[in-house]
Image: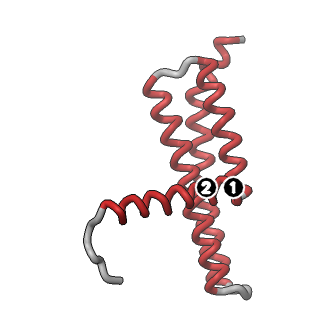
Amino acid sequence: MKNSGFTLRKRALSFKYAFHGIFLLISREHNAWIHCFAAVCVITTGIFVGLSSMEWIVICLCIGLVLSAEAVNSAIEALADRVSPAYDEAIKRTKDLAAGAVLLLAIASAVVGLIIFLPKLTLLS
C-alpha cells in the first residue's frame, strides 16, 4: 500500500472511520453491551462515592482498555470468520486467545474496581 503523504482530509477521514468503529462496537457487539453497562454502573457509583482524581484516572483507563480489547477481539473474530468460514482449529485457537485476553483484562479491571470501591462502600454502611 502506497503512502501518498499527510493531508488534513486524510486525518479527518481516519477519525471518521475510527468513530464508525466505535459505533459498530457499541451498536452490534453483545459483549460490548455488557462492558458498557458495567461502565455506566461504575461511573454512577464513582460519582456517588466521590472518587479522587487518581481513582477516576484508573477507572477511565480500565474502561477504555476493556472496550478497546473487546473491539480488537471483535475485529479478529470478524476477520477470522471471513477468511475461514468453515471450522478451522487454528482459527478457533486464535479466537479463543483473543476472547481470553478480553476476559483477563475484565477480571483485572474488576479487581481494580473492588480495591477502589470496597473501602468506600464499607464506610457508607
Q: Name the residue under label 2.
A: 23
Q: What residue type is labelled 2?
A: Phe
- Name the residue: 55% across, 63% down: 72
The C terminus, quarter of image = top right
Q: In this view, does 72 lie above or below 2?
A: above
The N terminus, quarter of image = bottom left
Quarter-of-image position of residue 27: bottom right
Badge 1 element = helix
Q: In this view, does 105 lie above or below 11?
A: above
Q: Residue furthest front?
A: 9
Marks 2 and 1 close (CB-CB < 8 Å): yes
Q: Mark 1 points at which residue?
A: 27
Quarter-of-image position of residue 83: bottom right
Q: In the drawing, does residue 44 fall left or right of residue 66?
A: right
- Residue 2, x across and y down, in percent: 31, 82
Circle 1 packing at 10 Å, graded few (<14), some (14-19), many (20+), is few
